[in-house]
Amino acid sequence: MTPVASLGRVAAIIALLALGCRKNPDPSHIELGDFVSGNQLNDTLRKLIPAGTRLPRVWEMMQTNGFGCGERAPTTVDLKTNTLGTGQTHLECYQSTRTNFGMRRRDWTVVFEHDTSGVTAINSGYIIQP
């Protein structure tokens, strides 16, 4: 192999690595590896999704960032009548990331409380799985 050919290959590899390390230009992109607490993610999401944002827009943004989403309704218990019911629905989104060189997994959950006008509150957190 000639020195010019090997230099060309090295230059091509460096160019590919540089493209792979490039930051995503999308302003609503969320890189979960950058967060170490639910509060940090909450602050970022509150900037990206202000109060009153409609659910379809929230759902689309979260799925674009790799989250799975679904509407959930908690089960409520009426202790006086001993009956079960459903509470106010909320949008719940979840995603996993690897930590500690891929040895552990961090499972993120984001809950968007809402009413007819749009999002009213955002709460997020994670648990660490082996």
Image (cartoon, rainbow, N blue to C red):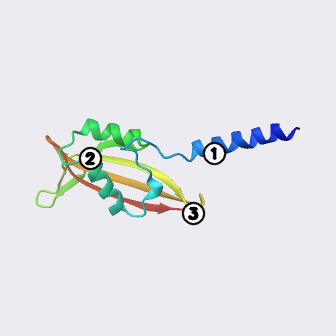
Spatial distance from mark 2 to mark 3, Cα to Cα?
30 Å
Give amino acid for label 1. Leu
Q: Is residue 92 above or below residue 5?
A: below
Q: CA distance from mark 1 to mark 2?
A: 32 Å
Asked whether the residues under the numbered discs 1 and 2 touch, taking CB atoms below 8 Å apart as contact, a structural biologist would say no
| First-in-chain label (1 vs 3) | 1
Residue 73 percent coordinates (x, y)? 25, 47
Residue 57: % across, % down: 28, 37
Direction from residue 73 to residue 104 in the image, left or right? right
> How many residues crowd mark 2 within 10 Å: few (<14), some (14–19), many (20+)?
many
SS at mark 2 in the image: loop
Q: Which residue is mark 3?
A: 100
The kind of residue on which mark 3 rests is Asn
Q: Amino acid at mark 2?
A: Ile
Residue denoted by label 1: 17
Q: Secondary structure at mark 1?
A: helix
Looking at the image, residue 122 sits to the left or right of residue 13; the answer is left
Q: Residue at x 41, y 43 (%)?
A: 65
Q: Where the N terminus falls, by quadrant? A: top right
Give residue 53's position: percent from left, percent from top.
Answer: 21, 42
The mark total stands at 3
Earlier along the polypeptide chain: callout 2 or callout 3? 2
Q: Residue placed at 81% from the left, 37% from the top? A: 5
- Disc 1 to disc 3, C-alpha distance: 22 Å
Residue assigned mark 2:
49
Query: Which is more N-terminal, label 2 or label 1?
Result: 1
Farthest front residue in view: 4
* Nearest to viewer (mark 1 / mark 2): 1
Find the residue positioned furthest to the right: 1
Q: Nearer the viewer, residue 44 or 103?
A: 44
Give the side of residue 72 with respect to residue 102, left or right. Answer: left
